[in-house]
Amino acid sequence: MENKDFDVIIIGGSYAGLSAGMALGRSVRNVLIIDNGKPCNRQTPHSHNFITHDGKAPKEIATLAREQVEKYNTVKFHEGTVTKISKNDEFAVETQDGNSFHAKKLILASGVKDVMPDIPGFAECWGISVLHCPYCHGYEVRNETTGILSDADMAYDFTKVVYNLTKNLSLLTNGRSALSEEQKEKLAGNKISLIEDQVESIEHENGHIRKVIFKTGKEISLNALYAKIPFIQNVDTSELGCELTEQGFIKVDFMQKTNIPGLFACGDNITMMRSVANAIAQGNFTGAVVNKELAEEQF
């Protein structure tokens, strides 16, 4: 790639990044998309709740999206991992392979990295039968014997949503619960089992959960397990001084702008509503906003 100066660099070539890239490519902006090919849903067999693509494999959707974006000759791609971002008059983006690229505007569509708990079998089931989102996967496991691995107010609120999909439900707090007595009574009244034992391991077959085994020796059979786990940002923006929310998401305003002029963000790195449809919508909007800002500056 000879040219290393662009109107816009997009970090992340999954759904949000490709969607932003298409919007900018159609606006004849000179765009570079940098991606390392490791989306967070790479283990997930099917994507749901995305109209016209319901039930397709995430990779199938992403492959088609990239093929369509590649038709716009103003959009270029670089396979690599971003190691450093800096800003003077423009943004400078360095990658692990020693390349450095520059742009007037920068879009972070870089997603997040889920931090797996130290539970044997958990990572192997993640995205297959250990699930993060009832809107993405809940219909497929409706009325199945289901668990939720979480605690405190987050667990209690999440249980209300999952209870609508199945009444065969257990809440696993992986140790002594932080739930209030009132919350525990409400769970019991809805016949939701509360299990406060620590989890030892997950027994599964090719990522399909069969049992949760506890350190006490107790075990329960499950067909699905929802889990709320921590995450970290895939791209470190601390050197730029980019603000994060209390939950660890990149903080943006209603125009997808961060607190750094010229720096935008969209997709899983800004919201707990992690879905393909949401990422694509955000990317499309962000591309339009960035193009409008460039147009205003150049007029």
Image (cartoon, grey):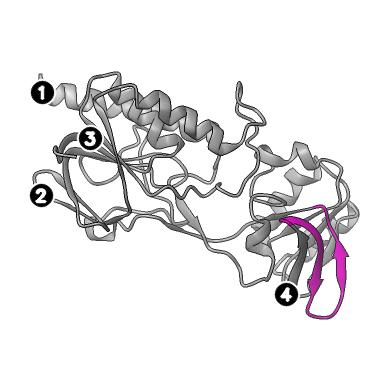
Snapshot quadrant of residue 53? top right
Q: CA distance from mark 3 to mark 4?
A: 47 Å
At mark 3, the secondary structure is strand
Task: Compare marks 3 and 2 and give the one earlier in the sequence.
Answer: 3
Q: Which mark, by number, is residue 268?
A: none
Sequence order check, earlier mark of 3 and 1? 3
| Residue 182 screen position, x and y as percent | 79, 60
Evaluate if marks 3 and 2 touch, with contact meaning CB atoms under 8 Å apart.
no
Give how far across and how far down residue 170 sits, in percent.
83, 58
| Local crowd size for mark 3, using a 10 Å CA cut-off: few (<14), some (14–19), many (≥20) | many
Residue 276 is covered by the magenta coloring = no
Distance from Cα at disc 3 to Cα at disc 2: 15 Å
Q: CA distance from mark 4 to mark 1?
A: 58 Å
Q: Which secondary structure, mark 2? A: loop
Residue at mark 4 = 175
Q: Secondary structure at mark 4?
A: loop
The residue positioned 41% from the left and 53% from the top of the image is 245
Residue 268, visible in the rendered structure: yes
Q: Which residue corresponds to the image point at 48% horizontal and 28% vertical from the top-left?
A: 64
Q: Residue 88, which numbered label?
A: 2
